Image: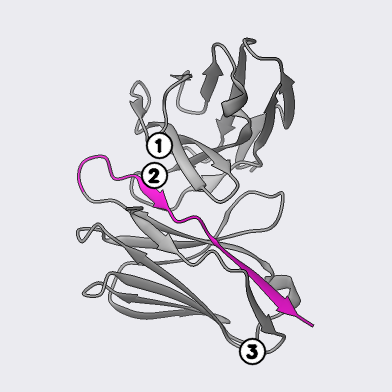
Amino acid sequence: NAGVTQTPKFQVLKTGQSMTLQCAQDMNHNSMYWYRQDPGMGLRLIYYSASEGTTDKGEVPNGYNVSRLNKREFSLRLESAAPSQTSVYFCASSEVGNTQYFGPGTRLTVL
Amino acid sequence: QKEVEQNSGPLSVPEGAIASLNCTYSDRGSQSFFWYRQYSGKSPELIMFIYSNGDKEDGRFTAQLNKASQYVSLLIRDSQPSDSATYLCAVLTSGSARQLTFGSGTQLTVLP
């Protein structure tokens, strides 16, 4: 089992560019999550999907959109990147209320 | 006020000592508590979870929960240099959303 995979691992964007971060899990989990991690801020929830077909905003959703493509895949889109979105992005999956398993992360820099 | 508070550290202990990491939370209805370890440049990985008041032991790690005081801690016995990492406390919020809220982490360094 690969667990949770994320692509790309690194990305550099210019302000105003768009991109999609991809996440897939092979653990048959119902719930998936997108977090960002900034120095001294811990992990902050951007969006989550409790089950296939549903998505909800987390603590910091502004500037992002998500798509739960199917049970395995959950993507995060930046429509118009801003320097404030420079961060490390983690995808995670779990059964509802249980342990979350994290992907390796995407390191995004917006110039 | 942040919902989950941790001392950011850094916390330094000598090899072989006990490292004590602390976390307080504000949501009195929280039921599940998790400790994650994160090495520099890597993703968080679960060390332990605890649901009930008291202690839970797993090898060199002991999680302690006191719901009345809204306090959870992680003890690492016989600390090793390989334990040097950032430790994240996470709390499963009550209510229908049931999301994990993370503390900002405590950086631990174990000195050889």
Q: Is B110 inside the magenta-drawn segment? A: yes
**Which residue is the site of mark 3?**
B17
Say whether marks 2 and 1 touch (CB < 8 Å): yes
Q: Secondary structure at mark 2?
A: loop
* Viewer-proximal residue among A50 and B83: B83
Indicate the position of residue A11 as horizontal and vertical percent values.
73, 25
Residue type at tag 2: Glu
Look at the image and tell me in which quarter the N terminus of chain A lies.
Answer: top right
Is B55 placed above or below B105 here? Answer: below
Q: Quadrant of residue A12?
A: top right
Residue type at tag 3: Ala
Q: Check disc 1: other Cα within 10 Å, few if <14, some if 14-19, many if 20+.
A: many
Look at the image and tell me in which quarter the C terminus of chain A lies.
Answer: top right
* Viewer-proximal residue among A6 and A44: A44
**Which residue is the site of mark 2?**
A95
Disc 2: host chain: A
Give the residues drawn in magenta, as a range: B95-112
Disc 1: host chain: A
Q: Earlier in the sequence, mark 2 or mark 1?
A: 1
- How many angstroms separate mark 2 from mark 1 (CA)? 6 Å
Residue at 45%, 56% (x, y): give it: B103
Indicate the position of residue A46 as horizontal and vertical percent values.
44, 32
* Viewer-proximal residue among A33 and A1: A33
Circle number at residue A31: 1
Residue at 70%, 15% (x, y): give it: A14
Say whether marks 1 and 3 touch (CB < 8 Å): no
Tell me if A33 is positioned left or right of B37 in this view.
Answer: left
Is A52 placed above or below B43 here? Answer: above
Disc 3: host chain: B
Labels 1, 3: front one: 3
Q: Quadrant of residue A85?
A: top right
